[in-house]
Image (cartoon, rainbow, N blue to C red):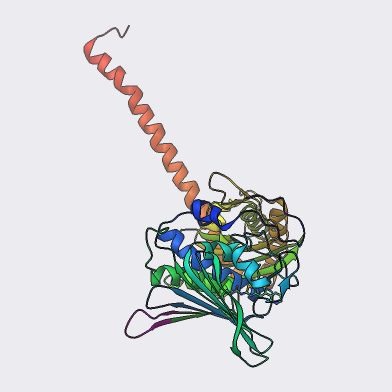
Amino acid sequence: MANEYGGDQIQILEGLEAVRKRPGMYIGSTSARGLHHLVYEIVDNAVDEALAGFCDTIQVFINQDNSITVIDNGRGIPVDINHKSGLPAVTVVFTILHAGGKFGGGGYKVSGGLHGVGASVVNALSNWLVVRICRDGKVYEQRYERGKVVKELEVVGECDKEQTGTKVTFMPDDTIFEETVFDYDTLKQRLREMAFLTKNLKIVLTDLRNEEPVEKVFHYAGGIKEFVTYLNRSKTPLYEDILYFEGKRDNVYVEVAMQHNDSYNESVFSFVNNITTPEGGTHLTGYRNAITKTFNDYARNNKLLKDSEPNLSGDDIREGLTAIISVKIENPQFEGQTKQKLGNSEARAAVDSIVSEQLTYFLEQNPIVAKAICEKSILAQRAREAARKARDLTRRKTALEGMALPGKLADGSDKDPK
Ligand code: 2B7
């Protein structure tokens, strides 16, 4: 997809046919994974509305016929006529493969996934889709089939003036998807993650396919802090606090939450615009640099590490550490084979400086926690050193034995090795 679109203008890039011909290009695949991705794209738009500060609840229903309904209590997608196309704004959102839509008054600068083209992609890949909008005391509705308008936007009722929002129901196209049955647990997993990543946002998932509806509410006032608590739920934390750092630098919004447990595994998850980055990238590098340097400085300044002792390694400090690194950035550049690794250098600098500064302050304010972490890291360092020595010793021993062997054989077979 082109990246050359400029400013606030929505540019028509391709028709919906392009999406139907090459669905994989837009949603990754037509397997169960791609199917579930349709839901995330629609929910993403509602999450953007929440990030803009206008929506606090998103409901997701798996309907009896395996269609999906998403409802938000945001401002409602604008319905006024878009000058460029002569179409209602909502029609543009659902039928034109526009790029990075910022129309309707901004607030959509931070966008993950398909950068605002999600709605039209989902529409193109659905047998039918119905959007209902509450705005200005009216209920508007439009219906599409395989991406095309089949019912013009019309007012179908009234609502309270203060009551605004968007409701989208869609049925995935069974001629495109190999799998059209939604998996409750798959949706549950991702929606929970989205709720953790957007503090205070309430996401409700309801499965209406059973006799008794199954419902799950995700609502975390603490956001990624609660994510860390959740990840450490079956472990023993080394201390009570969840370390939490937040700030904005160079237009990069940074949030980090972390807590050590008594295990030996590092468990770090990084995100860019609410999307997971399994291969890490600059944001993760910035975080690692910051904690390695800050803990070493603290340990030295407080004589927890003697002058004669070597620095703690990053691995020593991150042993048993559970952490979430979440950044929001306007133009994320993804690199690597699978394009899942963040490349923006300003993200490294932003995470490094925010974590260094706030972690230094936290350690000064919380000497008991600081000491516990340093002591665990020093133990990890000693264990690592002991393991290295044992390995070296074994190697030397086997090397010696190995060397002795030909000599011995030679001894027994021939008096003169030559
Ligand atoms: C980039 C496009 C997709 N949009 C708006 C405004 C509100 C809004 C949306 C949405 C999914 C299912 C329920 C802006 C943004 C279009 O422009 S999309 N809410 N919710 C959504 O899609 N939910 C908006 C400025 C003023 N008023 C409304």
Report x, y in % for residue 244: 63, 70
Query: Does the rendering let one see residue 237?
Result: no
Report x, y in % for residue 110: 68, 65
Q: Nearer the viewer, residue 412 or 69?
A: 69
Is 386 part of what is drawn in magenta?
A: no
Report x, y in % for residue 60: 49, 77
Q: In percent of the image, x 37 and y 84: which residue is there?
A: 213
| Main secondary structure found in the magenta portion | loop
Decide if residue 399 is on the left or right side of residue 383: left
Q: Nearer the viewer, residue 18 or 337?
A: 18
Q: Nearer the viewer, residue 324 or 65?
A: 65
Decide if residue 314 is on the left or right side of residue 88: left
Picture quarter containing residue 171? bottom left
Ligand 1's quadrant: bottom right
Q: In percent of the image, x 60 and y 70: which residue is there?
A: 45
Residue sitting farthest toward the left:
413
Q: Nearer the viewer, residue 285 or 403?
A: 285
Q: In percent of the image, x 38 and y 37: which residue is there?
A: 394
Picture quarter containing residue 257? bottom right
Q: Is residue 270 above or below residue 407?
A: below
Decide if residue 185 is on the left or right side of residue 145: left
Q: Is residue 93 above or below residue 378?
A: below
Q: Specify the segment rendered in magenta.
A: 206-215
